[in-house]
Image: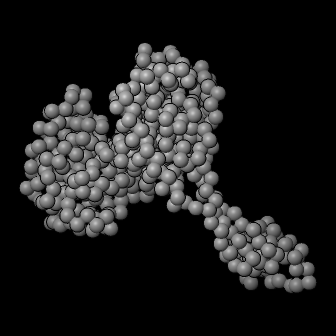
Amino acid sequence: MTREYLKKATHTAASDASQVTETVQAILDEIEVGGDAAALKYAARFDKYDGNVILSAEEIAAAADQVPEQVKRDIHFAHANVKRFAEAQKETIRDIEIEVIPGLVAGQKSIPVNGAGCYIPGGRYSHIASAIMTVTTAKVAGCDNIVACSPPRPGIGVAPAIVYAANICGADTIMAMGGVQGVAAMAFGLFGLPKANILVGPGNQFVAEAKRILFGRVGIDMFAGPTDSLILADGSADPAIVAADLVGQAEHGYNSPVWLVTDERALAEEVMRLVPLLIDELPDTNRENATAAWRDYGEVILCADREAMAAAADDYAPEHLTVQAGDLDWWLDRLSCYGSLFLGEETTVAFGDKASGTNHVLPTSGAATYTGGLSVHKYMKIVTWQRSTRDASRPIAEATARISRLEGMEGHARTADIRLKKYFPDQEFDLSADG
């Protein structure tokens, strides 16, 4: 048996990219030319908001007063965990130098980018955790200018808990602007802000497309699509917990794929029975999202054994990968394509999404085959340097001249020639392409 689909998706997560691209490009072009006024025009149109774009210290303090004390404690708890993990990640990057050959020293330095633009969704859901994930990692990386940008709600402004989280995590500026106009404002340096060198954070398809179009002019964390999650479960898994975890991720949006891969038919059938029941118990908006996601994008796949299950997971390369099966160390060693891995029933995607310390800005749509998620590393440039003695430059120059001529790059070769003639005037060198 290869893979038996007990439930197969009828849709894919692909959107009408051409229409979205055309719309977003037109908005970006207008804002780049029109500046602050054009951004404000789109803010009035889409955000339905006419308050301050750059929040004042008084507005930030007023927002903090609206956040319940327990929520503040929870935000501080999550921030501490994310900060601790980010600091440990940063320690894995170190400046190095090595004597490549006697007299030639080369090195590596890690330098944080200056400006980080952190987009924090605030539409359907107020993503407090996104403020924690994006701003904290930028701060730990050492970025000098961190802008947190989030869509305001009509007559209200940015959700107070988002403002509070962004502030305590280290944002230098908090901006009340959403969508493409918010991304453009950070990238183009509007409203007196420094231009962002990197744009990070989740968002809807228009935000994601704006980041994609701007990539190259600025860095981005990754190309993002709808969130997706896969669970690997064997016969030891609790079907109620598996079903709850699938539903918890399906509520993200109507096009958020959730997948179950198992080698136990009875488990699969019980999960398929439970999922619709759990969806029916959700609040209205959440229920609508989860119903559509499970109906159109959900899959249940039956495999012969755990090796076939692991192969399926690697093929899907999910954003979130959960293992509810025996021998967790085997799975940790075997699995290779995922944004973030959750091992055992005792942890779940929501823990990583909100408070456990690992980052929730992760690769989607199979991108986990080639990249990981947001971390301090995304904000840092790994650059190299070298210096040499004249004696050490001799073999390097000889090899450079010959390789350059073989490639047809005579100008390159002559930069080596001139040094050899200066440093070793009494010696002869064969620097022709054929050696």
Q: Is residue 165 visible?
A: yes
**Residue at 55% across / 49% down in the picture?**
141
Q: Is 78 situated above or below 398? A: above
Q: Is 52 situated above or below 119? A: above
User: In which quadrant of the rendered view does residue 279 lie?
Assistant: top left
Figure colour scheme: one colour
**Residue at 17% across / 48% down in the picture?**
241
User: In which quadrant of the rendered view does residue 120 lie?
Assistant: top left
Query: Observer-nearest residue: 215 or 274?
Result: 274
Q: How many marks?
A: 0
In the displayed structure image, the side of residue 279 where residue 108 appears, left or right: right
Q: Is residue 28 visible?
A: no
**Residue at 44% across / 52% down in the picture?**
85
In the displayed structure image, the side of residue 254 where residue 65 appears, left or right: right
Residue 296 at x, y percent in the picture = 22, 41
**Quarter in which the N terminus is drawn:** bottom left
Residue 164 at x, y percent in the picture = 45, 30
**Residue at 36% across / 37% down in the picture?**
74
**Quarter in which the C terminus is drawn:** bottom right
Residue 31 at x, y percent in the picture = 58, 27
Residue 157 at x, y percent in the picture = 45, 20
Furthest toward the right, the residue is 426
